[in-house]
Image: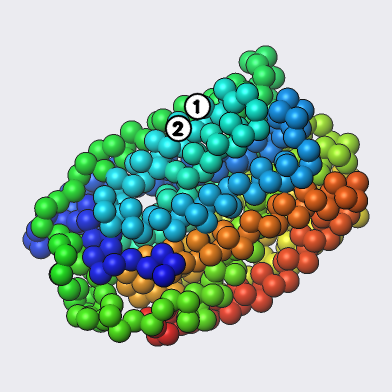
């Protein structure tokens, strides 16, 4: 079963020490105030570090290719490594969290990010470079899956707002790495190796609060065999939220692979991830080949990613108020198709406008995260849906960057790859409309 947690999955996430410590949900997370504040800081810092490993590479990809002797196809493989790692390691997140607790797993993930980014500059060839990148991406993968679970668990009545904060931090880290890597490398007069390695420092800072959150676990919540309160009480913030809806429900549940909601979410997530990783891996090269300088190409990528900062505050709350999120999916898709059309016809002349349009379209990620929290009623449902959606979705996204690299090398230009990117937007819209329907996973399984 893909990503299906056992009965007591994730029950140990910093649960309150006793029933008396549980607060009515809606205003702040359960437990002591300092832990709630530290959790908010930890979520934000973690989000800042979940994309620089990818977006810092795009603006320097040409230099990396030249130094390590990569062909276009191999470079395309490199841009697919994030999706591969997110799919493979993301599927392990529920089992790891069941064994060690989500806080400890996120902490270990950030340690892997720090180590991978620190080792990558010392790679002497492509295999070592890919291996160090994979270590960092493995850490990112488990955090990707567990963040929606942590938000649902500790902020059950503020899913939209906290998802917006998390998405804002993710977009900010993405944009900063894209914009600052080349100028910083040139200002310090260092090679691409140091320019990529400096992002390990940011990851090390993010690790600090999770060292405390990982240690802060209680003894009496989430024991094996505990059953949650059913119905309206699911999501009260107690450690039992990660059980099933009612005693024995785990044994009667249908496989998640038989859920139309799960598949529509996975396809929607996978296609938006395909667009995102093609953008992060290849967009700077598209602009550079059109005559834009390397530093400006990095800034243009940063513009695309930075659009997610303000929109991450706006989209999740709006989506949480709508009964059907399909209208938002269609609007974002229209922006994407317009941006690809402009990129095809006049990549350099309208570069800034195309970057803005594609930046709006790229905000399907915070929308998808919000929908994950809305398509399940319980935290246990979010665990299953998040693991399946992200694991399957990232598997579906693996061929995209590879095909773009192959099309580019075969055709000698960017016309065919851009047309391919635009074509993928159509099934993304269709899947998103189906995923946005007002149904939950529990209704189907």
Q: Which quadrant of the figure contains the C terminus?
A: bottom left
Label 1: few (<14), some (14–19) or many (≥20) C-alpha neighbours in 10 Å: many
Indicate the position of residue 80 as horizontal and vertical percent values. 64, 49
Report the disc number at residue 295: none
Task: Read off the residue under disc 2.
Answer: 114
Left or right, residue 121 beside residue 382: right
Taking the spot 58% from the left edge, 31% from the top edge, the residue there is: 128
Left or right, residue 163 beside residue 380: right
Task: Read off the residue under disc 1.
Answer: 118
Q: Residue furthest top?
A: 189
* Viewer-side residue, 162 vs 392: 392
Q: Helix, strand, or loop for circle 2?
A: helix
Q: Which quadrant of the figure contains the N terminus?
A: bottom left
Q: Helix, strand, or loop for circle 1?
A: helix
Left or right, residue 187 beside residue 366: right
Taking the spot 26% from the left edge, 75% from the top edge, the residue there is: 244
Left or right, residue 17 beside residue 68: left
Q: Is the Cβ of the residue at disc 1 closer than 8 Å to that at disc 2?
A: yes
Taking the spot 82% from the left edge, 37% from the top edge, the residue there is: 288
The picture quadrant where one finds residue 207 is top left
Label 2: few (<14), some (14–19) or many (≥20) C-alpha neighbours in 10 Å: many
In the rendered view, tell whether residue 274 sits above or below residue 214.
below
């Amino acid at each position: 079963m893909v990503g299906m947690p056992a009965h007591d999955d994730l029950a140990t996430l910093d649960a309150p020490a006793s029933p008396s410590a549980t607060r009515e949900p809606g205003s702040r997370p359960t437990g002591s105030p300092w832990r709630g504040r530290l959790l908010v800081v930890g979520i934000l810092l973690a989000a800042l570090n979940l994309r620089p490993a990818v977006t810092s590479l795009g603006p320097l990809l040409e230099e990396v290719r030249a130094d390590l002797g990569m062909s276009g196809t191999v470079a395309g493989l490199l841009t697919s490594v994030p999706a591969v790692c997110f799919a493979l390691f993301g599927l392990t997140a529920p089992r790891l969290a069941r064994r060690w607790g989500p806080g400890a797993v996120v902490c270990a993930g950030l340690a892997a990010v720090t180590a991978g980014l620190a080792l990558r500059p010392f790679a002497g060839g492509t295999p070592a470079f890919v291996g160090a990148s994979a270590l960092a991406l493995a850490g990112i993968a488990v955090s990707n899956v567990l963040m929606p679970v942590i938000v649902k668990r500790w902020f059950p009545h503020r899913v939209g707002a906290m998802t917006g904060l998390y998405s804002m931090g993710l977009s900010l880290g993405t944009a900063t790495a894209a914009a600052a890597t080349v100028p910083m490398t040139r200002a310090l007069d260092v090679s691409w190796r140091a320019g990529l390695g400096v992002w390990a420092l940011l990851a090390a800072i993010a690790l600090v609060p999770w060292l405390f959150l990982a240690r802060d676990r209680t003894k009496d919540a989430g024991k094996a065999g505990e059953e949650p309160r059913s119905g309206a009480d699911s999501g009260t913030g107690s450690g039992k939220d990660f059980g099933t809806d009612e005693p024995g429900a785990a044994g009667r549940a249908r496989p998640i692979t038989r859920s139309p909601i799960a598949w529509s979410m996975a396809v929607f997530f996978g296609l938006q991830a395909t667009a995102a990783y093609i953008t992060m891996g290849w967009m700077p090269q598209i602009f550079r080949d059109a005559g834009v300088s390397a530093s400006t190409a990095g800034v243009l990528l940063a513009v695309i990613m930075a659009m997610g900062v303000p929109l991450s505050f706006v989209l999740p709350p709006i989506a949480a108020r709508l009964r059907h999120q399909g209208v938002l999916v269609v609007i974002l898709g229209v922006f994407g198709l317009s941006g690809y059309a402009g990129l095809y016809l006049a990549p350099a002349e309208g570069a800034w406008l195309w970057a803005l349009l594609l930046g709006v379209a790229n905000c399907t990620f915070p929308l998808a995260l919000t929908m994950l929290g809305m398509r399940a009623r319980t935290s246990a449902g979010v665990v299953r849906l998040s693991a399946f959606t992200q694991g399957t979705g990232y598997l579906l996204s693996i061929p995209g960057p590879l095909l773009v690299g192959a099309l580019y090398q075969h055709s000698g230009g960017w016309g065919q790859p851009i047309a391919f990117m635009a074509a993928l937007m159509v099934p993304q819209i269709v899947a998103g409309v189906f995923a946005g329907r007002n149904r939950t996973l529990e209704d189907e399984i």
